[in-house]
Image: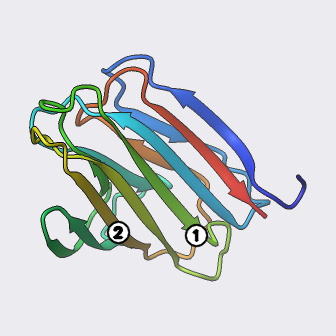
Amino acid sequence: MADGYTVLEYGTLASSSTTDITFSNIPQTFSHLEFTFSGISMMVQNRAFVYLKINDDTSTVYSRIGWLLENGLNRDVQSWAGPMNIASIQGTTAQANQAGVMKFDFVNYSSTVLQKTGFALSTSTDASASGNMVGKQNAWSYGSTNAITKINFNVSSGFKAGSTYSLGAWK
């Protein structure tokens, strides 16, 4: 579809030692990007995190506000130098090989007028014997008007081989 959703790239983690998923030379012919990740955490009763870095920028222009729904609602607000912790999947001790899903949206990524904003959603089961659902939402901002041409997702905190990802775009 010319004006619909287009998959730009997809892949599978070949090894649990994979540390980065990088998309370079992102075409500037679309309006919005979407990154989807289905990961299997290797952590033991902790979360495996995904960290976001845009255009190799390590300055202090990243911020987020997040909500974690796990036996109640927690909220945190953070600003820091990149890369930014943007989503997580629970550990696997009780729910071995349980995959979690993450979705990241980059709105107006090709604009050179607007600062970049977006949101991330993630869900997985927790490490309890009952396998309670955990949901996390983050609204984030990247305080730059530069078009996004490169995105790096650091997955070094521990995801199993076979975890999958894709980057798609809309006009």
Query: Where 22 sits versus 112, above or below?
Result: above
Image quadrant where residue 125 sits: top left
Residue at the spot x=15%, y=73% of the render? Answer: 74
Say which of 135 and 114 sits in front.
135
Query: 76 above or below 86?
Result: below
Name the side, left or right, on which 73 lies relative to 19.
Answer: left
Q: Residue at x 42, y 29 (%)?
A: 163
Q: Residue at x 36, y 25 (%)?
A: 18
Q: Say whether residue 7 is left or right of residue 103.
A: right
Residue 92 coordinates in the image, percent (x, y):
19, 32
Q: Is residue 73 depicted above or below 49 in this figure?
A: below
Q: Position of residue 86 (x, y in %)?
A: 33, 58
> The disc labelled 2 sits on which kind of residue?
Asn
The residue lying at 21 percent from left, 43 percent from top is 90
Q: Which mark is residue 138?
A: 2
Disc sitting over residue 2 in the figure: none
Determine whether, in the image, residue 88 is placed left or right of residue 166.
Answer: left
- Residue for badge 1: 146
Looking at the image, tell me whether mark 1 or mark 2 is earlier in sequence order: 2
Give the number of marks. 2
Q: Residue furthest bottom?
A: 113
Instruction: Please name the amino acid that badge 1 sits on.
Output: Asn
In the picture, the quarter occupied by the C terminus is: bottom right
Q: Secondary structure at mark 2?
A: strand
Image coordinates of residue 146 in percent, x first then y, are: 58, 69
Discs 1/2, front: 2
Task: Tell me if residue 60 comes above or below residue 148 in the rendering.
Answer: below
